């Protein structure tokens, strides 16, 4: 686990009030201190601490995504932060114009737009929904891409593919844990865009093939992948892009 | 089945308006002309689509997990048959595109099998389809028409599944499966759109060089209010400025069950 580089205050006590928030999360309370931290890759007891009443926030110096709807949305926010940051670096690279052809630049520029919209949406939505609490909104994560060569077309596209496919699997696997219908709709509105992204990136990598919806992601029933947070987070962590430690002990 | 209720349900103003919209609006498919309101009345009764049980025909549009899957299966029947017929049409699909269409077709067939099994005795029968809309479309003799209809189907499927997710919350396994199908349809949509020279995502309510009768597939996609927030007020922090196109593209929109049925009914004769 990386050291926390972001300074956040410990979760204080408090409760939610229903202010003018875009989305409302009610009925949640903060737990006390002394919570066990699950390791990033510790799957053994993943799921045993699932607790939908846990708000996101720092526990023992590390930000936990929280449980319940707030946890799922925060989890989505974290993934969107990663994607947005990645595509920002892609389009900002001074070799963007020479590494990619016109079609690829248009696709990547659009993916940048969409992921930034997703990220900023979740930031506003969570800030509103968690109004009245302190330290519950996931801070800006830090990212680093050691060794990733931004002017290597194959590497950038392969990374984009991994992120998009992971995003699809993450949203598909998280849907069943959302209890508020409006949030499920929002997740639905986003996941199909991620899937459109995935197909486009895959077709750029291997044009003329069935990879856009390849047999590596779509099974014999015609179903895309769906993975729980406890399955997705270790995969994302292994990319080593996210430098800020966080836990997700209350998510399935 | 109540004929009066059927007629009432299919002659809502929105649908008539969309059907009669002039196709001259940036529409290169001039051969489509106007699809008259008469076509709507030939559509299948709601009762047939949602249940084989006559007693529930009157409540066919009630939202349940079963009705959600019945709608899904109906759309999958439609897509499955459409692609099968396309692949069977000699000389229609260029060899360079066979791989794409075959993969999509394979998935739609798999979706039919999966949903049929999930529904068991509640599975509706496959409707009788007419993908030419009474001869108005050269769907299986003109590849550009075939692809345009394919795009409409895929974009409709994405929106329709999304609209039904809420009805499946009572069953986590079925909800997850629906989401897993939904994202595959989105992959399809992206690919078909890009084959047609469009972006893989939908900009505003413009389907992208689509015939006028498909506008209901895209109405609403221009929405920029998400979760009560006007997302056009959002801004980028360290990169190129966000655009309105980006705002509309970054979220897909739902179609209600009724809206999805209305679109599908254009191609259902019984």
Image: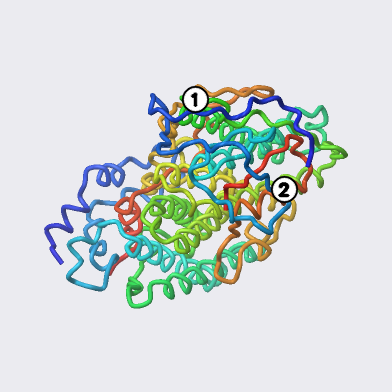
Q: Is residue B211 above or below residue B229?
A: below
Name which residue lies at 35% across and 54% down. Answer: B260
Residue A71 position, x and y percent, is 54, 42
Name which residue lies at 53% across and 44% down. Answer: A67
Q: How is the image coloured?
A: rainbow
What chain does badge 2 belong to?
A
Q: Is residue B46 left or right of residue B251?
A: left
Q: Are marks 2 and 1 on the same chain?
A: no
Q: Which residue is mark 1?
A: B232
Classify mark 1: helix, strand or loop.
Answer: helix
Q: Is residue A243 left or right of residue A48?
A: right
**Quadrant in the picture for the C terminus of chain B:** bottom left
Residue A244 position, x and y percent, is 73, 34
Residue B225 position, x and y percent, is 42, 31
**Quadrant in the picture for the N terminus of chain B:** bottom left
Q: Which mark is residue A39?
A: 2
Classify mark 2: helix, strand or loop.
Answer: loop
**Labels 2, 1: front one:** 2
Distance, label 2 to label 1, CA atoms, is 39 Å
Mark 2 in CB contact with mark 1 (< 8 angstroms): no
Dot 2 crowding, Cα within 10 Å, few <14, some 14–19, many 20+: some
Residue B173 position, x and y percent, is 47, 63
Q: Is residue A73 left or right of residue B117?
A: right
What chain does badge 1 belong to?
B
């Amino acid at each position: 686990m990386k050291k926390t580089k972001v300074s956040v205050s410990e979760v204080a006590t408090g409760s939610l009030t229903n202010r003018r928030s875009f989305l409302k999360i009610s009925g949640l309370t903060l737990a006390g201190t002394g919570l066990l931290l699950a390791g990033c890759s510790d799957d053994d007891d993943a799921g045993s601490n699932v607790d939908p009443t846990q708000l996101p926030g720092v526990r023992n110096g590390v930000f936990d995504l929280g449980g319940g709807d707030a946890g799922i949305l925060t989890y989505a926010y974290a993934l969107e932060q990663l994607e947005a940051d990645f595509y920002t670096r892609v389009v900002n690279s001074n070799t963007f114009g020479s590494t990619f052809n016109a079609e690829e630049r248009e696709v990547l520029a659009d993916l940048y737009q969409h992921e930034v919209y997703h990220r900023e949406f979740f930031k506003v939505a969570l800030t509103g929904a968690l109004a009245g609490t302190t330290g519950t909104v996931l801070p800006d994560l830090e990212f680093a891409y050691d060794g990733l060569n931004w002017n290597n077309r194959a590497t950038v596209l392969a990374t984009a593919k991994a992120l998009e496919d992971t995003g699809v699997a993450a949203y598909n696997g998280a849907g069943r844990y959302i209890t508020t219908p409006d949030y499920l709709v929002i997740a639905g509105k986003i996941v199909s865009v991620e899937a459109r992204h995935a197909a486009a990136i895959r077709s750029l990598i291997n044009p003329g093939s069935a990879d856009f919806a390849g047999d590596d992601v779509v099974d014999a029933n015609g179903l895309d992948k769906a993975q729980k947070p406890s399955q997705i987070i270790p995969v994302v962590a292994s990319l080593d892009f996210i430098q800020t430690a966080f836990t997700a002990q209350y998510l399935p | 089945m109540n004929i009066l209720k059927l007629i009432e349900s299919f002659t809502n103003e929105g649908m008539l308006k969309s059907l009669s919209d002039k196709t001259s609006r940036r529409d290169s498919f001039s051969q489509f002309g106007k699809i008259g309101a008469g076509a709507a009345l030939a559509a299948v009764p709601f009762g047939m689509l949602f249940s084989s049980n006559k007693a529930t025909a009157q409540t066919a549009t009630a939202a349940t997990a079963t009705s959600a899957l019945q709608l899904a299966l109906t759309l999958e029947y439609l897509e499955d048959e459409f692609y099968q017929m396309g692949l069977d049409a000699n000389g229609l699909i260029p060899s360079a595109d066979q791989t794409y269409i075959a993969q999509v077709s394979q998935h739609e067939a798999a979706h039919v099998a999966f949903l049929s099994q999930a529904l068991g005795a509640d599975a509706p029968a496959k409707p009788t389809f007419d993908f030419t809309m009474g001869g108005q479309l050269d769907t299986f003799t003109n590849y550009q028409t075939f692809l345009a209809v394919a795009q409409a189907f895929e974009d409709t499927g994405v929106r329709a599944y999304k609209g039904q997710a809420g009805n499946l919350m009572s069953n986590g396994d079925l909800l997850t499966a629906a989401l897993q199908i939904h994202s595959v349809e989105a992959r399809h949509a992206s690919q078909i759109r890009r084959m047609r020279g469009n972006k893989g995502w939908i900009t505003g309510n413009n389907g992208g060089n689509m015939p006028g009768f498909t506008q209901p597939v895209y109405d609403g996609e221009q929405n920029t209010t998400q979760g009560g927030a006007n997302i056009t007020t959002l801004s980028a922090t360290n990169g190129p400025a966000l655009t309105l196109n980006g705002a509309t593209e970054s979220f897909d929109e739902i179609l209600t069950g009724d809206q999805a049925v209305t679109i599908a009914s254009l191609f259902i004769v019984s």
